[in-house]
């Protein structure tokens, strides 16, 4: 914790706080520290229990993802209220854990929109990597009915799933694009030059074009 305190940068904190993250540690320096520490599950658990955002990000980097029980991950996700900790926990830990599918199903139906967003993030992963047994048409039904009025974090996760279905599954592409155009979610999202817009119809078109160019 003392070493993390020395890495605190007020300018980095200012930037991070604009995105809802209450820490000022440069992520490159955090990764370098994690590389030096290597995997240490006990240390990761102690770091997580501090409640400090930078410490929790470090915990995610040095933990053993498959070592967590299902209920442990459920508690951790509900404690992870800053966007960066939430995203890293889902992408770097939960997706690699044997309980990921159980958690995907449970979280997707959770009344807490942040928790539900994690469920949708795991669903997007399955759409891309293991779509068998997923009801893609049913997912599009839910997105069509609920995405427009969903809270920001949940809406973002549902939009990612919509785009992934359109990109990876040609038989659902026209409907995914139509839903995106009618709901117009993230249509006006500010996008840096050279980056692809998160607006689903634009995103789908660009990624399909890249696949065809290969």
Image (cartoon, grey):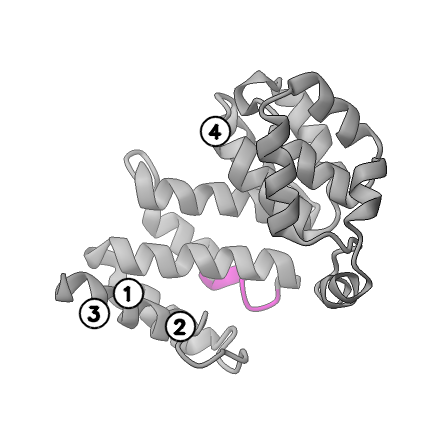
Residue on which the image places disc 3 = 209
Q: Measure the C-alpha gap from mark 1 to mark 3.
A: 5 Å
At a point 38% along the width and 49% down the height, the residue shown is 138
Do residues under tags 2 and 4 come within 8 Å of each other at their CB atoms? no
SS for callout 4: helix
Q: Which residues are magenta?
A: 144-149
Do residues under tags 1 and 2 come within 8 Å of each other at their CB atoms? yes
Q: Measure the C-alpha gap from mark 4 to mark 1.
A: 25 Å
At a point 56% along the width and 30% down the height, the residue shown is 103
Q: Residues within 10 Å of mark 4 (few under 14, many from 20)?
A: few
Residue 5, image x and y in percent? 84, 45
Do residues under tags 1 and 3 come within 8 Å of each other at their CB atoms? yes
Closer to the camera in the image, 20 or 182:
20
Q: Residues within 10 Å of mark 2 (few under 14, many from 20)?
A: some
Q: Measure the C-alpha gap from mark 3 to mark 2.
A: 12 Å
Residue on which the image places disc 1 = 207
Q: Residues within 10 Å of mark 1 (few under 14, many from 20)?
A: some
């Amino acid at each position: 914790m003392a070493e993390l305190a020395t890495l605190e940068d007020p300018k980095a904190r200012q930037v991070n706080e604009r995105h809802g993250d209450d820490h000022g540690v440069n992520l490159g320096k955090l990764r370098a520290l994690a590389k030096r520490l290597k995997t240490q599950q006990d240390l990761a658990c102690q770091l997580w229990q501090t409640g400090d955002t930078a410490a929790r990000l470090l915990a995610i980097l040095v933990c053993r993802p498959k070592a967590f029980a299902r209920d442990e991950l459920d508690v951790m996700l509900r404690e992870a209220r800053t966007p960066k900790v939430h995203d890293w926990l889902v992408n770097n830990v939960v997706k690699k854990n044997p309980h990921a599918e159980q958690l995907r199903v449970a979280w997707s139906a959770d009344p807490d929109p942040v928790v539900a967003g994690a469920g949708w993030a795991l669903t997007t992963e399955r759409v891309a990597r293991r779509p068998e047994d997923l009801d893609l048409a049913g997912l599009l039904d839910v997105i069509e009915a609920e995405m427009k009025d969903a809270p920001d974090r949940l809406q973002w996760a549902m939009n990612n799933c919509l785009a992934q279905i359109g990109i990876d599954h040609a038989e659902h592409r026209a409907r995914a694009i139509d839903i995106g155009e009618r709901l117009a979610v993230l249509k006006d999202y500010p996008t840096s030059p050279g980056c692809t817009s998160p607006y689903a119809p634009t995103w789908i078109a660009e990624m399909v074009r890249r696949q065809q160019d290969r």
